[in-house]
Structure formats: C-alpha cells, structure tokens
Image: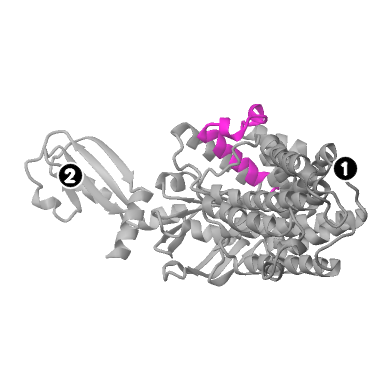
Amino acid sequence: MNLNGVLAIYKFEMSRTRRTLMQSILSPVLSTSLYFIVFGTAIGSRMGNIDGVSYGAFIIPGLLMLSLLSESISNASFGIFFPKFSGTIYEVLSAPVSPFEIVAGYVGAAATKSLIIGALILATARVFVDYQIDHPVWMLGFLILTALTFSMFGFIIGIWADDFQKLQVIPLMVITPLTFLGGAFYSINMLPEPWQTLTLFNPVVYLISGFRWAFYGISDVNVAVSLGMTFLFLLLCLTAVWWIFRTGYRIRH
Amino acid sequence: MQSIISIQGVGKSYSSGFTALKSIDLEIKRGEIFALLGPNGAGKTTLISIICGIVNATSGKVIADGFDIARDYRQARSQIGLVPQELTTDSFETVWHTVAFSRGLFGKPANPEYLEKILRQLSLWEKRNAKMLELSGGMKRRVMIAKALSHEPSILFLDEPTAGVDVELRRDMWEIVRELRENGVTIILTTHYIEEAEEMADRIGVINRGELMLVEQKTELMQKLGQKQLNLYLQSPLESLPAELAQYNLTPSEDGTQLTYTFDAHQDTTGIAQLMRSLSQLGIDLKDLQSKQSSLEEIFVSLVHGKDA
C-alpha cells in the first residue's frame, strides 16, 4: 500500500480547496442559507407541520442532501477531470499507485470537503431554524456514506467527460431535478398517484428519506430500504471504477 | 554490461487500425545515456509512455530493473522518473509543493534536505516559493526534471528535453544530464535533434515509423556509416580534372580552386597518401587542407531515406 501516494493526492486536492475557499466552501453555504431564509423562515412560517415537524426543520435534511450531492459530484469530477485536461495526469499514471489508491486520494478529498460543507450548513441552519437530531450516529453514517458514494460518482463523471460541458451536464440535468423531485421540500406522501409510485424510481428519494429519519425519526420509505439503496449505488459506482481502471477507459490508452 | 531495461517484442496498435509501434526489442544498459532518435511521429513517445505506464502495450513485455512493468508495476515504476515533452504543470502550485507532491506520489517519505539538494542543483532554490505560472518555460522544464528526480529514480526518461529551448538552456540541460549520469542514473532521451544525440549519447537507436532501424554505439555508428571528406584547397585553380586523377573519388568545385576527396575512414587504406603523391607528381600545389567527418544528421537522413526508397 502506497500510503504516501494516497496522502500526496489527498493533500494536493485539499490545498486546491483552500485556494478556492470562496467558491468551494462559502458559495454552497450561502446558497443553502438563502433556501432557509426563503423556504424555512419566510414561506415555512405560513405552512403547517409535516408529520409533526415544522416545515423549516423538515427541509433541512433535503437541503443538506442537495448540497452534499452536488458538491461531492462537482468537486470529485473536477478533481480528476482537470489533470486529464491539463495533462498533469501523466504523473499519477506513471506513479506506483494502484487504482484503489488513486480513487482513495481523489474521492477521499472530495468527500472530506463535502462533509465540511455539510457541517457548515448544519451550523448555519441553526441560525434560522430550530431542529433536533434523533439518531446522530445514523445521521453521520448517512452523511459519510452519501459523501463517499457521490464523490465516487463524480470521479466517474470526471473520467467520462472529455469537455467542460459534459462535466456540468449530469449534475445540472440529472442530479438537481432528481433532488428537487426526491422529496427535499415535501413528503412524497403528499403527492397524488401515479407520481407517488413513480417517484419511488428516483434513487434520491431513498437518500433523503433515510437522512430525514436520522433527524426526526420520520421517513417516506423504510430506513433499511434507504440504507440498502445507498449501498447499492455505492456498489454500482465501485464496479464502474473497477471497470474504468481495468480497461483504461479514457485515461490509459 | 548488464541491462537495466529490457524491451521484448513491444508493439502498439490503436482501434483505428493505426500501428504506432511494430515489435520493438531493445536493451538499455545500466548507467548509459541512450538516445532514441527519430522524426516526429516515429513512435518515440509511445515507446517511453509504455515503459512508464501511461500507455498500455498491445503486445510484448518490458522489464525495468528486474521488474515486469505490468505485473510488478510498483517496484518497476518506483525506479523510473519521467520528464514529459509537454510542460504540463499545476499552474497555481509552488515549485516546492509540486516537487514534494511528486515525491509523495511515488511513495517516498518527505525529505526536505534531498529536495533542497535537487532544487539547488537545478538552480531552482531561489524560486522554490514561486508559483508555476510565474516561471519561464526554461524554469518550468527544470521543475519537470526536479519532479522526475524527486523520488530518487535510477532510470530517467527525458522526452524531447530541449524542444523549444534556447541554446543556453540546452547547454545547461546537457550539463545536468551528464551530472546525473555521473551519479549513476541511466538516461534515455528522445530527440529529433541530431546534435543532441551526437553531443550526449553513448548509444543511439534510430526509430522510424514504429520500427527500430538500428542500435549502435555512437562512435561506431559514425565510424561505420560515416564517410570522411578531405577538402583540398589549391594554390592555383584547375581548368579540368587531369586524367591521372580520375581513379580517385574527387569532386572539383565550380571555380576549380578546391577538390573534395570522399573516402571511407573505416578502410585500412584511405588512399590519401597515394592521392598526395599523384598531386605532387602533377605539380598541383596545395594551399590548405581540411578533413571532415559526416555528421549524424547525414547518417540519419541516409538511413531514413534508404528505408523509404
């Protein structure tokens, strides 16, 4: 195991985050704060409770998930796309690091950054809304698992993308709609049929539902199913990464 | 001498049908400077990219310092440093950080003293806190060398090290390479500058269209293929070449003041002594004479064209 190699990639990525502090940490915190002001405080105060939870508090897990998904994906995808684009990837490819170690470095750093953002958003939310966390260990577990899974998904996008447009297209055209329609702002029980059944095909529903359960003990779907779906997605990403390195897809010709 | 790199039947073709390398067999000796010489697109970069692990070979295998580059990639790659042709750097990183990153990436624990030594050796110490984007092209090239040396490799690949580099820096680069060799590093450089191969290499391999056409000691190559020329500057011009001199391979200049005698330096008898006697008998006096060895460039052109024909 080349631990120094993993650490070198991890530290390199984290120093990139430090260099772009405004853009990488403050901007997601600011945009989430705006959601809290508009939906949580302004509109939320005029809305009734959902499953016994105030609307402002109800949307916290969904908003956190929204940031977590988009930040994990964009950070990890950019992290690997840029060396590919600039050519500096030659060094990683010629180094004595295994595919697992490369992924651990890039994905580990992207997930760390997402977790920092998650913690900052939780702290910011406290300013606007009062909330509780019923199952803090589960909450942390879901947070880490989601950050890792979607950072890995971002890594795959970064490998796949051969231009800047492709880098943006999945987060913008797929992840954001899925999150908005995945119950970030409502309980899926509030949807009429057939939307209620159709929405179960949206994987983000399971992430948000499980996460909300960790906060308030309420969920749209069984928490075990949520956990299972998250693991399933992690497994899919792992398989894709394994295939990428086995075939050299878009990185080693 | 023992081989440090053994390339056995290495080929590379792409799905488009393009064959970048036909079956290449090559042994690199420990401690030598080997120049891979060839025109653009000959397959030089593809070959070193395969050895360094950036490109997968379609066939064949490579052993680097006793380790198979595919099976024992960790051990093999730890021994190898690569300075790529393109100046691809992380613009916002400092010189120090980018070199320290390379060392870590190759699995070595931090060693600031060693990094300082390399940076001083490459005249980069004063620039250690400068960001890469603030450096000139030549300085960036030095940083690329420092990165490649950061993990103390025993084999160093230099892909076109002096492409687009001014004369002064080129001389510096040659000096650096010689020092590295003195420290026991085996150096493989690719170049399409004949002058570079002639100046630096112990052995030369000529590659063209994915085929290794020959591998020779530089001196042997020049001796074997090199023809020598003797320029004779005459006291008074000749109107025509006397019949007695027809047996010699002589070319008179247009104004008749000069004769060029071409001979094979490798032969036991060059014919020079006989020619001198003949000139003396004919009363042709000489003002000056000069001999010239054909350059590697001429050898190279004749090789590449010979194959094309």
Task: Indicate the quadrant where residue A101 lies.
Answer: bottom right
Residue B250 location in percent, x, y? 18, 50
Depth check, front residue: A126 or B154 = A126
Depth check, front residue: B306 or A185 = A185
Question: Which residues, given as a range, are shown in magenta?
Answer: B123-152
What amino acid is labelled 2 in the image?
Answer: Leu
The answer to whether B262 appears left or right of B92 in the picture is left
Q: Chain of mark 2?
A: B
Q: Main secondary structure of the magenta part?
A: helix
Point out the image quarter for the C terminus of chain A.
Answer: bottom right
The reply to whether the C-beta atoms of the residues labelled 2 and 1 are less than 8 Å apart is no
Q: Chain of mark 1?
A: A
Task: Indicate the quadrant where residue B118 lies.
Answer: top right
* B125 drawn magenta: yes
The answer to whether A223 appears left or right of A16 in the picture is right
The answer to whether A192 appears left or right of A253 in the picture is right
User: Which residue sits furthest left?
Assistant: B239
Q: Residue at x 34, y 59 (%)?
A: B303
Residue B171 location in percent, x, y? 49, 35
From this view, report whether residue A199 is shown above or below residue B201.
below
What amino acid is labelled 1 in the image?
Answer: Asp
Residue A44 location in percent, x, y? 77, 45
Number of residues whose C-alpha sits closer than 10 Å to that of mark 1, classed few (under 14), some (14–19) or many (20 or more): few
Residue assigned mark 2 = B279
Q: Are marks 2 and 1 on the same chain?
A: no
Residue assigned mark 1 = A130
Res. B265 in view: no
